[in-house]
Image: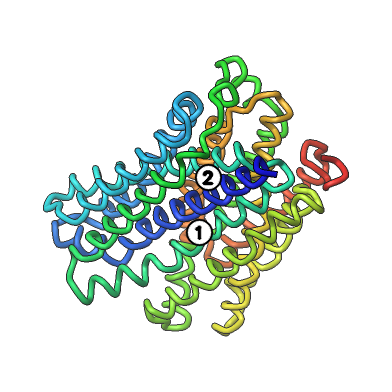
Amino acid sequence: MQTDRSLRKAQMAALWVVGIAIFTDMLVYGLIVPVLPRYALSLGASQGAIGMLFGSYAAALLLATPLMGIWSDRAGRRIPMLFGLFGLAGATILFGFSHQFGLLVVARILQGVAAAATWTAGLALLADIFPPAARGKAMGYALSGQAAGMLLGPAIGGWLYQWGGYNLPFLVAAGLALVDGFLRFLLLRDTEPAASARQASAQDMFQLIRRPKLLLISGVIVLGASLPSALEPTLPIHLQQVFSASPGLIGLLFAIPTVAYGVTSPLAGTFAYRWGAKRLIMIGLIITAIALPWIGAVHHLTLIGLLLAVLGIGFGCILTPTLSELSAAADDAGIRSYGFTFAIYNTAYSFGMFAGPILSGTAAESFGLKECLILFSIIAIVYAVIIYRSAALSAGNSAV
């Protein structure tokens, strides 16, 4: 009884610290969106340079994630998560007090490296401490922190900028990072798994990468990240040109799928265990494929808002089950190197986040928004068919 009580206490501590860490990371990520472009312009940066500034986050996340995964398996979860905290705090301070564009790029890169440490070690910690039946739900709750941070970050950043100038948003972010760090230090003391459960050889890692299940899930993650990010460079222009939408209204519309995603994620984690990841991911892909083309075709903002809500539900159904399926793939291979496993998640996600806007921006410029979204819809349908024909993913609780 005492052992069960201690385990539940450790599980709740891990869930709180990982959820808050992800929330803080995404809050700071969104905090700079309404602030940084204007400041970079004042330093003489071009639009292209500002695009490079924002893209450097995804590039740093992509490159740093595999290293953070290996480090997390060898050193434990606590040290990389504390490193992620100090990296995030350092990045926010550098953002707030930089007077050269090059230093802003350095801060953005540091922010991406810190996110790689936090996400990889945090998700691995949840996989360490939660049994397979509860992992999906726990990780769904953790991803709700992502949605909340993305939702609140831009609004808080813009408000703080208007109230206290450029430096204030970053000073507040540094303060939040300190609070987050105190929680990480306090709550992670009793949640560290045994080192023998983390270590894996290079051969084990190579065998894990080659597993069909992991390759299939990685494709789902890339697609699940690229679909929402594809709307970022295209939909605002469409809303402005067709509906004369203000920046505030555009921000409100983009908040709709974020809220829907945050609400859906915990439910999707539970349903993935009951129904199977295969079925839920297919549902998410089909929902997304149906809703996407209509966004470029309807002529009423209310309908676009409803479609964005549907898309948020679809995104939650696509991405959330992949977390527990990745840990299951490692378990099936007899490898509990969850740090390396979730490094694969971060790598695939950052690649999708990087590729989605590039593909959508190019396609929208060449063919138009409606045709661009039809292209992404076709890609989603094709991948849903691939998943349907595959036997690699779990088919529900009876198959576990």
Amino acid tagged 1: Gly
> Left of 242 or right of it: where is 45?
left
Q: Secondary structure at mark 1?
A: helix
Q: Is residue 327 above or below residue 297?
A: above
Residue nearest the observer in this picture, 152 or 18 = 18
Mark 2 burial class by Cα count in 10 Å: few <14, some 14-19, many 20+: many
- The residue drawn where x is 61% and y is 67% is 263
Q: Secondary structure at mark 2?
A: helix
Give the image location of residue 78, x and y in percent: 43, 37
Position of the N terminus by quadrant:
top right
Mark 1 burial class by Cα count in 10 Å: few <14, some 14-19, many 20+: many
- The residue drawn where x is 83% and y is 47% is 397
Give the image location of residue 373, x and y in percent: 59, 62
Give the image location of residue 173, x and y in percent: 29, 59
Which residue, as the protein is rendered here, is positioned at the far left? 99
Q: Is residue 88 above or below residue 370?
A: above
Q: Which mark is residue 349?
A: 2
Position of the C terminus by quadrant:
top right
The first of marks 2 and 1 along the sequence is 1
Q: Is residue 159 above or below residue 270?
A: below
- The residue drawn where x is 18% and y is 72% is 164
Any part of residue 150 in sight: yes
- Please tell me whether mark 2 or mark 1 is closer to you in this view: 1
Q: Which mark is residue 145?
A: 1
Query: Residue 157's quadrant in the figure?
Result: bottom left
